Image (tube, grey):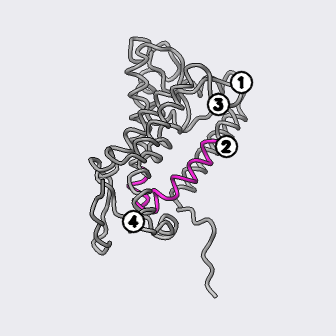
Amino acid sequence: MNREPIFNVPGAVLATLGVLIAVHAALSFLAPDDANWWVLALAFIPARYSGLANELPGGDVSAVTSFVTHMLVHADLTHLIFNSAWLLAFGTVLCARLGSFRFLTFSIAGGISGALLFLVINPGLVAPVIGASGAISAMMGAVMRFLFTAIDRGEGYLLRERPSAIPLTTLKAALRDRRIVLASVAFIAINLLAIIGFGKFGETGDIAWEAHVGGYLFGLCALGAFEGAAQNEPPASPELD
């Protein structure tokens, strides 16, 4: 008798998780001053773009690379575990739908979008932003575009077996779907509560809610541009208000 695996994590997700763990482990073996230098060099710091790039670790090089490298660094083990759990939950489904290359490209773009919103809201801020939360928030937003479609069609099992077979909800329809709107409002509201300290985890740093919201909105709006629709997928059901 054939048995379906309980967990079927795509290689790109496992590789991403492995990189996050490896970076965290490597930094933990460094002397405190060296580790701090590398964290700042890899982190996204808005002040780099207001004339302070050369005064911060990494200089002008980090002003370019930190849009991506900030996703590789985590404040502590709790931060890493938390993001890893959400990466496995949402990344597994999204990678199975998009394929490895599109998934990695989408995730990087989502993280960059989160960093850009953080920069817009906090110009000149010296505080560093680290963690993969912006990219993972983009994954959450993307999954909203086909999660409820699978549920409505009674095909929730496809989220595990073949996510690419679930028709994509158009952005216009998604913005009119009360469930997606409520889920999005709840996500944003929970992140805004971080302003007053709600949801802080671990012992280090505050929540960069701007990066979370920027990533989520990117994922919700931009998934269609990354879709590689299979020609043999079933046609979408009529949209219902």
Sequence-first disc among 1 and 3:
1
Residue contact between numbered discs 2 and 4, judged by CB atoms under 8 Å: no
Sequence-first disc among 3 and 2:
3
Q: Which secondary structure type mostly characterizes the magenta part of the structure? A: helix
Q: What is the residue that sits farthest to the bottom in this orientation?
A: 1
Provide residue 147's location: percent of width, then percent of height: 44, 57
Sequence-first disc among 4 and 1:
1
Residue marked by disc 1: 32
Kind of residue at disc 4: Ser
* Disc 2, SS: helix
Residue contact between numbered discs 1 and 2, judged by CB atoms under 8 Å: no
Q: In this orientation, which residue lies closer to the viewer: 52 or 235? A: 235
The answer to whether any part of residue 81 appears in the image is yes
Specify whether residue 64 is painted magenta. no
Residue marked by disc 3: 75
Residue lying at 61% horizontally and 51% vertically, measured from the top left: 18
Q: What is the residue that sits farthest to the front in this orientation?
A: 241
Sequence-first disc among 2 and 4:
2
Q: How far apart are marks 3 and 2 (CA)?
A: 11 Å
Q: What stretch is highlighted in magenta?
A: 82-104
Q: How far apart are marks 3 and 4 (CA)?
A: 34 Å
Total labels: the figure holds: 4
Sequence-first disc among 1 and 2:
1
Q: In this orientation, which residue lies closer to the viewer: 168 or 50? A: 168
Specify whether residue 91 is painted magenta. yes
Sequence-first disc among 3 and 4:
3
Is 157 left, or right, of 239 in this rendering?
right
Residue contact between numbered discs 3 and 2, judged by CB atoms under 8 Å: no
